[in-house]
Image (cartoon, helix red, strand yellow):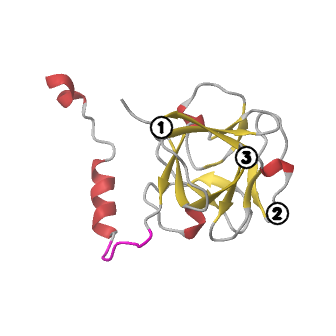
Amino acid sequence: SLKPMELKENTDYYLYCKDDNRLVTLDETTGNVYRSGDSLPNDGLQTWTLELEGEIVYLKNTATGQYLTVAGNENGSNIFADSSQTDSSRWRVQNKLSNEFVISDAASGKLMSGSGGGIDNIHLWENGGSDLQIWKFVEKATEEPEGDKTELQKLYDEWKDLDLTPYINGA
């Protein structure tokens, strides 16, 4: 059986949406936080660290020092990055299975959510049981591997949409 992953304070993580494995990325110009088209990290704006205060978690972008913050408590409220810790940047992170988490606004209990299709801003939404509301934390390596990542990206792009149905269960 899979054991729950324990998240560590002051550790850099990449944060992926389970639905499509796209990275949570900060747009430094607008302050918006969105699921990028990238599945492989390529930017410090995709790296987040956890600051803990009891059961409360602050998610801080390592490139800018800004905190993941919600602009309200209604369905569809935008999630963006703000330079200070406020009541709106308080989150609870609950481990669902191994490396799968739901991230809820501490005030409303609503979940951090992506939208279906396309690159989109992340927002708040009531629990719908969707993979768009499940997040994976992947610890950033302390040292980047040397070499050209272009070939790895090409290989990933070539195989990512491969239909494996014929190979499942000996079919």
The residue depicted at 85 percent of the width and 49 percent of the height is 87
The residue depicted at 68 percent of the width and 70 percent of the height is 64
**Structural distance between the alpha carbons of marks 2 and 1:** 30 Å
In x, y percent, where is residue 46?
56, 61
Residue ID for mark 2: 84
* Mark found first going from the N terminus, 2 or 1: 1
In x, y percent, where is residue 43?
53, 68
Magenta range: 142-148
Mark 3 lies on a secondary structure that is loop
Mark 2 lies on a secondary structure that is loop
Does residue 155 sit above or below 42 in this rendering? above
Residue ID for mark 3: 54
Q: Residues within 10 Å of mark 1 (few under 14, many from 20)?
A: few
Residues under numbered marks 3 and 1 in contact, where contact means CB atoms less than 8 Å apart: no
Does residue 121 sit above or below 111 in this rendering? below
Drawn side of residue 130 relative to residue 60, left or right: left
What amino acid type should be assigned to the residue bearing mark 1? Pro
Name the image quarter holding residue 98.
top left
**Structural distance between the alpha carbons of marks 2 and 3:** 19 Å
Residue ID for mark 1: 4
Name the image quarter holding residue 27.
bottom right
In x, y percent, where is residue 159?
28, 48
Q: Quadrant of the C terminus?
A: top left
**Residue positioned most to the left:** 170
Name the image quarter holding residue 94.
top right
What amino acid type should be assigned to the residue bearing mark 3? Gly
**Structural distance between the alpha carbons of marks 3 and 1:** 19 Å
Of circles 3 and 1, the one toward us is: 3
Of circles 2 and 3, the one toward us is: 3
* Mark found first going from the N terminus, 3 or 1: 1
Q: Residues within 10 Å of mark 2 (few under 14, many from 20)?
A: some
